[in-house]
Image: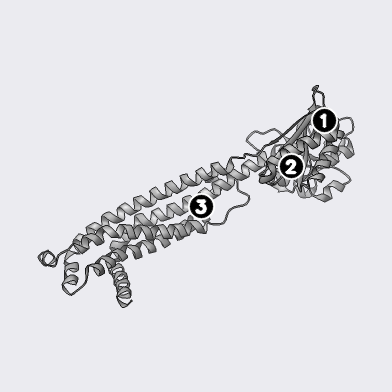
Amino acid sequence: MTGLVAAFAEAWDEVRIHKVRVIVSLIGVLIAVAAMTVITALGDMARQANAEHSERTSGRPATLQVSAWSMDGSLVASDTLTGAYAEIVERHSVTYSSVLSTNEQLFRFTDGVEPVWTTYIDRSYGEMHRIEPREGRWFTAADERRFAPAVVVNEAFHQRMGAPDLRTNPTVVIGGERPVRATVIGVTPDAYSDESPSAFLLNSHQAQWGIQGAYPGAPILELWVPPEAADELTGVVTSDLASLVGVDLQVDVYRIDPSDFDVIDGQLQWVIRGVSVIALGMGALGLVNIALVTVRYRVREIGVRRSFGATSGRVFFSVMMESVFATAVAGLAGVVLAVAIVKNVPIEELIGGSVTDVPAFPVRAAVEGLVAATAIGALAGIVPATVAVRVKVIDAIRF
């Protein structure tokens, strides 16, 4: 045990004595570990941004969409379908569901009446599609009991109104045969540049105030269910809806969220790890080159130690541990640098998307960086340590 501790102490002393050489040789490792950690952190954030984008457009895993129409091609009465949908939700104890329909609705702005594409939903739709208003809020249970309808609009709609402060409870008139004044309670980000004005209205408000659009269509049901139950519910809901409506129906139930997202996510992680390994390998090559050159300059020192009784194992271990200690310190510095970069760089601009649930700094990446740096130090130290062991005392005296 004493010999082992002495070897560790000797290796650490060599690192301190040759600190300039160590710093120069480990710049590549430090940068590689920092790059590896930053790449892993950015990968986690990119995957989260990709998942959130998918959930906003297609729903959370697993979202089932249910639609139905008569076999002769005619529309089934909306009230009939809505009642059957409600029965299905209650029968299968689905926590998050929404009846969905879209239509072109007239809105009266200060400079005239304009048709706006409007989506009628239940308030659970916001949670199912991760809708986060940029200003204001999404619908709540209290909104369903309002004495006037509430509306959530996109940024283009908000700008069309003159961008009023939502704290002043701005209103807009929904046109048609029975005009009704609605209060704007939230503004969602535009899905893309130059998007046209659009709006969300609650199904309960549509029914209560008789808000009808220009092109009424059959409502669709969306269900957010556990992914493992999606396949089973697909068949069950199909038969249940046909039996509840009581007419010859064509029922379509399919999953609208990407079911292969886990596969894509796994492939992305392998790509990230591959890039990280390449970055760390490049740093290790530089370390090996400098370590070999350094050993050649230390031939006399190593020969003197051998002449005083240092064994081959002792010389090998001490030289290799110099690399291990040095790379461990470089790895720690690289992780600290990576944390500083991730915390202070506008990551959302780099990955090209907004992230609502920003993942914490990946501790796994920091640990992997430290372990990888230490392992690289051990591997990089084997070659110079082997060269040092082969040094002969007589050759060292001549050197």
Image height of 80 relative to 269, above or below: above
Residue 252 appears at what percent x and percent y?
73, 32
Asked whether the residues under the numbered discs 3 and 2 touch, taking CB atoms below 8 Å apart as contact, a structural biologist would say no
Q: Give the mark, 3 or 2, whose residue is nearer the N terminus.
A: 3
Kindly report which numbered mark, 1 or 2, lies closer to the viewer in this rendering. 2
Asked whether the residues under the numbered discs 1 and 2 touch, taking CB atoms below 8 Å apart as contact, a structural biologist would say no
Helix, strand or loop status at disc 1: loop
- What is the quadrant of the N terminus in the image? bottom left
Residue beneath label 3, please?
Answer: 41
Q: Quadrant of residue 66?
A: top right
Q: What amino acid is labelled 3 in the image?
A: Ala
Count all numbered tags in the image, as a single digit.
3
Mark drawn on residue 223: 2
Residue 390 appears at what percent x and percent y?
18, 62
Q: What amino acid is labelled 1 in the image?
A: Gly
Image height of 227 relative to 387, above or below: above
Query: Rounded to the nearest whole Å, what is the CA distance between mark 3 and mark 2?
Result: 33 Å
Image height of 33 relative to 61, above or below: below
Of residues 64 and 35, which is closer to you in this image?
64
Residue beneath label 1, please?
Answer: 213
Residue 97 appears at what percent x and percent y?
76, 43
Helix, strand or loop status at disc 2: strand
Q: What amino acid is labelled 2 in the image?
A: Leu
